[in-house]
Image (cartoon, rainbow, N blue to C red):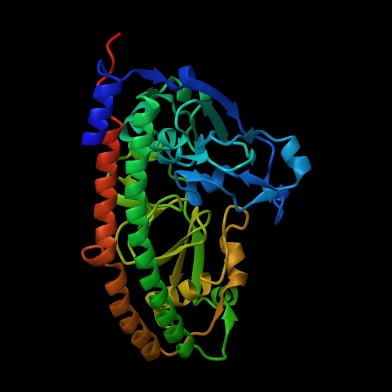
Amino acid sequence: MNTIDRLVRKLSPQGVPHKALAELGTFTRGGGPQKKDFIDAGTGCIHYGQIYTHYGISAEETNVFVAPEVASRSRTAAPGDVVIAVTGENDEDLGKAVAWLGDSPVAVSNHTLIFTSLLVPKFVSYFLQSTSFHQQKQRYITGAEVRSLPAKGLGSIRIPVPPLEVQQEIVRILDKFTELEAELEAELEARQKQYAHYRRQLVEASQSSDVSTLGKWEDRGVVKLGRGKVISKKTLAATPGDYPVYSSSGVGSGEFGRYGKYMFDDERITWSVDGGGRLFHRPAHKYSVTNVSGWMTVDASQVRTKYLYYVLITKWENERFDYTRKAHPSVIRDVYSFSIPSLETQDEVVDALNSFDALVGDLSSGLPAEIVARRKQYEYYRDRLLSFEELSA
């Protein structure tokens, strides 16, 4: 912080100007590439859905491509532009951004705005994560079930504009925080891979040759699949309460918000239909799931919910669900196949994996807790670094 203070006193002693984004650059709406246009190689493409799930603050390469002729009729972001997602299921999604730092233009899908300015690109991306930005954008968000942030509203949001040298130093400091968190996450990921290997061995050893698809088990009444219902932020605000609502857009536990009503109070498996098909074990409590989540119950006389969860997690690791292939209940009925061993065998597997799972995932100790603490520290310093005394008019 001292370095930033010294630079500001030296370069902007009277204070830092705050300006509307529209005063500092131009917004161009993305458009052109669609999922059906994606190919294995060609011109890079940023799809708005991946801004939520794939990218961080910046990117120098993409993992989806379109043919040159598709790119030629598409909106593109030049190196140094910031691609901003302006449509989402909830308010938190709106304004998520990636600074494009590749060597050549990249095609950009719809539901985005491309911001071109003389600001340091990553400085803009970091600002779009800040508390100040999220507080300002609320007045401009429109829509009920699908939320949008119009270009005019986004352009009205005010951003501090310190000298470029200060912007670069802020980016350097925040990048360091990001790198430290990434190192911790890499170590945690390595441990999780060890655990996944151990889990896979135990699950596979418990399986037999009497294998059926999830759909056939459902036909026999062993399991039952369903889907949540539409619950928007507006719905939550209209009926406040303390019951969690889970959705594919959430992180961690998948919690989307809190509600005054609940759909379930029993043990279930839920999964994200839109968010990569990730599965969750939900112990008995009062909760709801949104329409972009599926739910599953079991016949307790034949299968333990937690055992089935461990089986499905193991199967899920070999699948790929994303914004092009969604994990609808009708899809996973035919994707997952497994056998159901005796309840005694199921209990043995669950007991062993519960113990191992606690070592890896307990947020009260170890690496996960350190990552949470580091993330809170980062958010605190990010907001401080992006707060400046405004230059008097």
Front-lying residue, 10 or 203: 10
* Residue found at x 27% / y 74%: 359
Q: Which of the 4 quarters of the picture holds residue 310?
A: bottom left
Q: Residue furthest right?
A: 69
Residue 57 locus on image (x, y percent): 44, 43
Q: Position of residue 211 (x, y in %)?
A: 57, 85
| Residue 213 percent coordinates (x, y) | 59, 77
Q: Residue at x 45, y 39 (%)?
A: 96
- Give the answer, above or below, for where 79 lies relative to 324: above
Work out whether residue 1 or residue 278 is closer to the camera in this orientation and state it. Answer: 1
- 57 vs 110, nearest the viewer: 57
Residue 156 at x, y percent in the picture:
43, 20
Q: Is residue 153 left or right of residue 327?
A: left
Report the residue at 60% width, 42% height from top: 103
The extreme front residue here reads: 10
Left or right relative to 324: residue 248? left
Q: Is residue 152 among the parts visible in the rendering?
A: no
- The C terminus lies in which quarter of the figure? top left
**Is residue 142 among the parts visible in the rendering?**
yes
Q: Is residue 341 above or below residue 111?
A: below
Q: Horizontally, is 337 left or right of 271 in the view?
A: right
Query: Splitting the image into 4 quarters, where does residue 91 fall?
Result: top left
